[in-house]
Image (cartoon, rainbow, N blue to C red):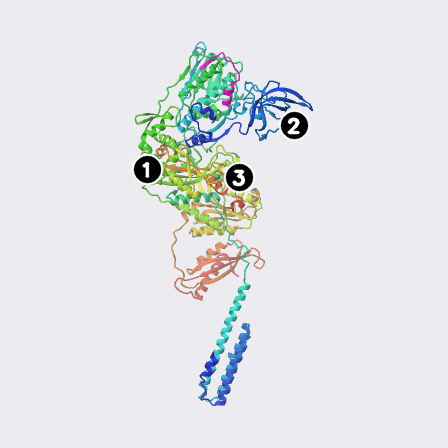
Amino acid sequence: MGWRFFVAKNPINNIPIERGIRMEQRLKEILEIAESELGGITDMKALEEMRVRFTGKKGMLTEVLRGMGQLSPEERPAMGKLVNEVRSEIEGLMTSVREKLEKEALSARLVKEKLDVTIPGKRPALGRKHPLTQAIEEMEEIFIGLGYDIAEGPEIETVYNNFDALNTEENHPSRDEQDTFYITDNTLLRTQTSPVQIRVMKSSEPPIKIICPGRVYRADTVDATHSPVFHQIEGLVIDKGVTMGDLIGTLKLFAKNLFGEETDIRLRPHHFPFTEPSAEVDVSCWVCGGKGCRVCGGEGWIEILGAGMVHPNVMKACGIDPEIYSGFAFGMGVERAAMGRHNISDLRLLFENDLRFLRQF
Amino acid sequence: MKVSYSWIKEYTNIDADIKSFCDEMTMSGSKVEEWKVLGEGITGVVAGKILSIEKHPDADKLVVCKVDVGSGEIQIVTGATNVNAGDLVPVALHGASLPGGIKIKKGKLRGAVSDGMLCSLSELNLTLNDYPNAIVDGIFILDRDIKPGTDMIHELGLDEEIIEFEITSNRPDCFSVIGLAREAAATFKKEFSVKEPKPLEKGTGNAADMISIEVYDKNLCPRYTGRVITDVIIEPSPEWLRKKLRDAGIRPINNIVDITNYVLLEYGQPMHAFDLDNIRGGKIIVRSAGEGEEIETLDDQPRKLDPSMLVIADSERPVAVAGVMGGADSEVTGNTKTILFESANFNMTSIRLTAQKLAMRTESSGRFEKGLDMNSTLPAVNRACELVEELGAGKVVPGVIDVCANIPEKKKIPLRPEKINAFLGTDIPREEMINIFKPLEIEINGDYAIAPSFRPDLLSEADLAEEVARFHGYNNIKATMLAGEGTTQGKRSYKQNLRNIVENVCLSAGLYEIYTYSFTSPAVFDRLRLPAESILRKTVIIRRPLGEDYSVMRTTTLPEMMKVISHNSNRSVAKGGFYEMSFTYHPVDKEELPEQRTVLTMGLYGGGDFYDMKGIIMNIADTLGIAETEYIPVIDNPVFHPGRCAAVTVDGKSIGTIGQVHPEIADNFEIPGDTVLCEMDIDAIYGLANLNRKYSELPRYPSVSRDIAVVVDDEVSAGNIIKLIKATAGSNLEDVEFFDVYKGEQIGAGKKSLAFSMTYRSAERTLTEDEVGTSFDKVVKALADKTGAMLR
Ligand SMILES: [Zn+2]
């Protein structure tokens, strides 16, 4: 390395031999000592001490430089250059030792800083939405994607909006005080979210595409499958040329989105006052896929929806001409959907709000 | 409606097995709730003839019978005392099963071999009503001539397949076997026929001479048809009739009553039989009940009547509540000699309200309230007379008394096949539609369809479309996607988005969403310590609630939140945080509908404090871009700790309340004392929020911070100090933050130390120490002047 270079290009051939050679030897000696000492250095402190001894202000090289006074002015530049070369040679050697030590120190620190990554993390507080909200929002998203708006209305409604405008016969059992909570003869706690549809049909022009989620009330005593308070989500479409085929297509798409691509639906004729034709809608069982199991009672189908073509009387009551427009409506119970999907067997859990329950969703 | 499959098959030649019958009926609109075999699980029971009876050698209470069971002679040991040699009895053979999972096996009883068991009624799931001549706790002695070995399961009708249909309220015609058979025939495209009943009328005289019928209000009773039977012999009905009633879930009583029930099931037309000898004055009057009038009904209950109720009366008193139930003292008894059959049509609303008022819904009222066909009274009463003759129960007197209003014309509905196809999204030819209509007895007259009188549900073209769709098959309609030209936006409204944002802040604060009931008990206001005049006590009241606890609509959501906290803390859930986005309901003077306010309720217990809750509210305000919220101390809210409650205000208007519960409230609701609650008026927030954010340039010059700690009197609020700092520090003050409060001996009693950090920055240049110092001094002076603050 440097030393060879130093020998090959001896710059002091014109220095009086004796003094020049002595200083040169001294430099060679210093370099050799430095090299050998460096081999034994294992920590930064020793390295720093060494730096002070060799290249520090009072170090060996400074000492050599001081001795330059004895040289002739002609000799000095060459010798000065030689000293600097030795200095940088030593500094270079020390730098590489320093880098090596730093690397070792870093590795040692990293080893020391090792964490037990299996210790549980510190979780910032984070709440969850109620499973009913989660179910409603999932359904809303599906229909928002299909261009539906979300409509809302009051829970305390007129008998007119809840029954009359929905073509409910005067004698329909759902009007009974045993089934419905009345406030006065003309007002009640809505038994369905359908009055929202009436409000929207009355206040806006077709085309109408809405989803109405909300809370409804029926005079059922509380048990594992009944609650006087529950939730529905309903849909309504009114436009020119809407067909029952469109209803079936829409419900198929909805069911596939909600329960998976393989899901099929089945419509059974039924009676609702506000639709004609009316249907109850089953989806193929999400557990057994239709083969029949405990969840679907061996039927292979699970009833989830009511649906139908909007009754012309309902449209007329809202000022929409059924000769020009047609439409469909559908509705489902949110509790039932949420319970089915999470395997919740008792409806009361949904209104008890036990934190150990809420944390599961 | 419960009926045996075999009865339906009497009117149509359907041969499908029970499973596919039920499936197809459900898919064409007659929903089968369930079906089952009447004697499900009973096997291996045959007729056996007792050949001999001997005493058991080792048991006094047992006898040993030799029984001929057709396939041979077996020995059976029994403890029964009502059997004699020569009796024919049901025998459960070795390997037979009986209800309740009982298996019959050969064995020995006290040393004597027994190859089977003699059966009683109950061991075959039968009752005395089915076989009135049997005895309750003895062996069922068969009163018939059958060969030993005959299969008793078939013989007793235990193999009947019973179907329970769910009939929708718009199809009164399907509350009858004939109606269901008609639907079945249309579903399976099979023959359907009903024989017109024609009694032979072997009685003498004329009915009209024996009784007169008068109807006061033909709106309430459009038709009343009566026939008279003389020489009545009351006895049990024959087995075939009892079996049919049994299969339909109706208890057999005697031949005459059973006939009326049979016709009710067959035709769907309720009937009643009066003991004519107990009808006074030779007169039936259909009229409204008088005020305070009373009747004892068939179930031996006295009933108070009122003028809204329709009664059947004789010249003196009511003898039946019309369409609901007959009276006790004109009922058919064992001594009855002459009867009047009533087959009438009553106003559906009147019957419904009467049944409701008297709390007695019967097979009869249930049918009337759905609206029956005026045309069915005559065939029904004739059918009853025919059965009387068939059973030899009496002589039918010639003549029918029929008081009848005008029978409405059949409904004519325009039939436009192209319109129906456009509506359904189908391509069904007119001919096919007509073929669908024919078995349903919908006639075609040119471009019109004529609905039969028993189908009150067929009124418009949409109803015809449903008939077409039902029998074409709902699921044969091709699924399509909406083609409509118009477009809709498909998005959440501003308010919906805003609520979502608020909820997300709650979630990120660790709160769990809850759902609670919207009604509550009026007693809750006392537990909330609300003063008598509190506006919150003005509630929307449910007229007929499920109970006191659910009787008024809530005006505050706090009690339900506290109930949830109580539920959780009582179950050792150490801490929790909840929120609910819900409504409160407030009556409004002179308005039909109350006001419904949207409320965010939050609750923390077990470790959270006032400031944790306040932090959440500050985050909500911040996220919604509501700049200046102020917290004004509230000392008189009865729910909250007087020193730990604040009104959340914006521009002087309250948008919510936050506070730690009052210790008495904590006791009243059984919740931890550290519970902190908040109620926020979301409706007020809609107008305050600003979600429209504009970028402001990032600072280019460095900021300078100064901390200030002052000692003030206890009453001086930190909020006030912050306000003063902001007002006096000048335009270079960027922010001031509270960071510490300290009370203690060093400060002195009645004093506290408050510490704030002020940040100065200019948008134009780096501020000098002098500038900041001058402002700081001004602040110190202002605080000293206005609040007596001493720099610490
Ligand atoms: Zn299944």
Q: Quadrant of residue B79?
A: top right
Image marks 3 and 1: residues in contact by CB distance under 8 Å: no
Instruction: Give me the chain letter of mark 2.
Output: B
- Please tell me whether mark 3 sits on a helix, a strand or a loop: helix
The residues tagged by marks 3 and 1 sit, at their Cα atoms, a distance apart of 53 Å
| Residue occupying the far right of the picture | B58
The lab-note entry on whether marks 1 and 2 share a chain reads no
Q: Is residue A239 above or below residue B143?
A: below
Tell me which amino acid carries mark 1.
Answer: Gly
The residues tagged by marks 2 and 3 sit, at their Cα atoms, a distance apart of 69 Å
Give the residues in magenta: B227-245
Mark seen at residue B56? none
| Residue occupying the far top of the picture | B205
Q: Is residue B11 above or below residue A222?
A: above
Q: Quadrant of residue A236?
A: top left
Which residue is nearer to you in this view: A246 or B354? Answer: A246
**How many numbered tags mark residues here?**
3
Mark seen at residue B108? 2
Mark seen at residue B524? 3
Q: Position of residue B89 (x, y in %)?
A: 58, 21
Tell me which amino acid carries mark 2.
Answer: Lys
Q: Earlier in the sequence, mark 2 or mark 3?
A: 2
Q: Position of residue B232 (x, y in %)?
A: 50, 13
Mark seen at residue A241? 1
Tell me which amino acid carries mark 3.
Answer: Val
Compared across the picture, whether B709 is left or right of A271 comes to: right
Indicate yes or no: mark 2 CB to ligand 1 under 8 Å: no
Q: Quadrant of residue B191?
A: top left
